[in-house]
Image (spheres, rainbow, N blue to C red):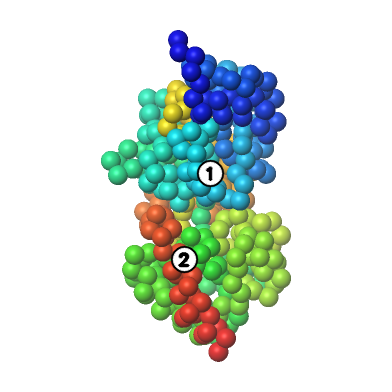
Amino acid sequence: MSSSITRRSFTKGALAGVGLTGSGLAMPSLVRPAAAADRLLVVQWGAQWIEISEEIVKKYNETKDTRIAWELHSGGSAAIVAKIKAIWPNAPYNVLSVWDPVFRDMIAEDWLEPIDESIVTNLATIPDIFIQKNDAGQKMTVPLSTAGAFWGYREDVLPDGFDSIEDLLRPEFKGKVVVPYPINLTGLFIVTCAIQRGGDEKNAEPGWEFVKELAASGAIGQICTSNSEFINAMASGQYGVGFWNNGGWFATAENFPVKIKNRMEDNKGFLYNEGFCVLKGSPLEAAFDFANFFARPDINEMYNIPLGSGPTQPGATANPKIAEWYYKPDELEKYAYIADYAFLGQAKNEWNERWEREIVPLMRS
């Protein structure tokens, strides 16, 4: 056997040896590639994501001896793309937890292994609409959570609510609407406005016209750039309606009665998925087996309950507090929309500039 050490196997051994995020591993800093097959470096978010993941790994290790080290995302999951690009093909990571726009970036870079469905057998029951694919049609991701951006309102502030976002042009909604800048939520606010008037992300002009009407009517009361801004705005009682992600709505619903408008006849709920992908050069059998365990229906349910996200397995039960926010498989076609996130990633900066140029002056007038 050759004793040569690649930069990737050296980095993998060194990172695993320090026991990232309390993995408790004690390993030599040099590991031959063949000996690394039962070790994985997994990138995950912090807070409740890493907490529940560590609990799941305890269950996994009851029957599997694969040793897991963790690295946490820093500065959002998109930052991992820059980190990998800087050192590719010597990136030390094996399994990464990211979401759809980042999956698209990694697929475009050709960094990912197609999912081996002979190992990831639980992928077969996850709706195909959730799975990201490459240009050849190969499945590249193992979706674990469904999240989304939705319209909604505080029922105590606006007891009569609304049936369509066209209603937000009425005088009683003046100053009551909270929305994101286009660069936030990957431009989905412009997309929902476009769909309202018959367009979509690639035909956004109808959306811009609707946004101009909202701005000119005075409906938009606050523009938010973060979850905390949205949560604080909705908590103030000054605003009653918003378009935001499930995380912000989940936090709001902890303290106030919230109605999510995810089944409107003339608009959509905008879904995106978080899950696992596997980098090329990883110990594939171990990596795919690990991903398959997380995709098991009972584990998928366990994973999502504390996250406030919807499970991707139809057989898993969502957190009862938010079960109505997500869709049954037979509702997806009618009510759900999964945007072209690769396109939106390219458009959002231009859209933000256009917002400043065309929308902000209307709000000042």
Q: Is residue 107 above or below residue 359?
A: above
Secondary structure of the residue carrying numbered label 2: helix
Per the rendering, the mark at residue 137 is none
Q: Residue furthest left?
A: 136
Q: Quadrant of the N terminus?
A: top left
Q: Residue furthest top?
A: 1
Q: Is residue 295 above or below residue 164?
A: above
Q: Position of residue 260 (x, y in %)?
A: 55, 61
Which residue is pictured at 30% across the width and 44% down the height?
Answer: 135
Q: Position of residue 261 (x, y in %)?
A: 51, 63
Nearer-the-camera pick, 179 or 236: 179
Of labels 2 and 1, the one closer to you: 1
For disc 1, the neighbor class at 10 Å (few under 14, some 14 to 19, many from 20) is: few
Nearer-the-camera pick, 305 or 184: 184
Q: Residue furthest front?
A: 4
Taking the image as shown, residue 267 lies to the left or right of residue 25, namely left
Q: Is residue 147 above or below residue 34?
A: below
Which residue is pictured at 48% across the width and 18% down the height?
Answer: 4
Would you identify the image quadrant in which residue 245 lies? Answer: bottom right
C-alpha gap between disc 2 and disc 1: 22 Å
Give the residue pinned by disc 2.
349
The answer to whether residue 196 shows anywhere in this view is: no
Answer yes or no: do the residues labelled 2 and 1 have beta carbons within 8 Å? no
Give the residue pinned by disc 1.
83
N-terminal of the pair, mark 2 or mark 1, is 1
The answer to whether residue 225 shows anywhere in this view is: yes
Amino acid residing under circle 2:
Asn
Which residue is pictured at 58% across the width and 82% down the height?
Answer: 174
Amino acid residing under circle 1:
Lys
Secondary structure of the residue carrying numbered label 1: helix
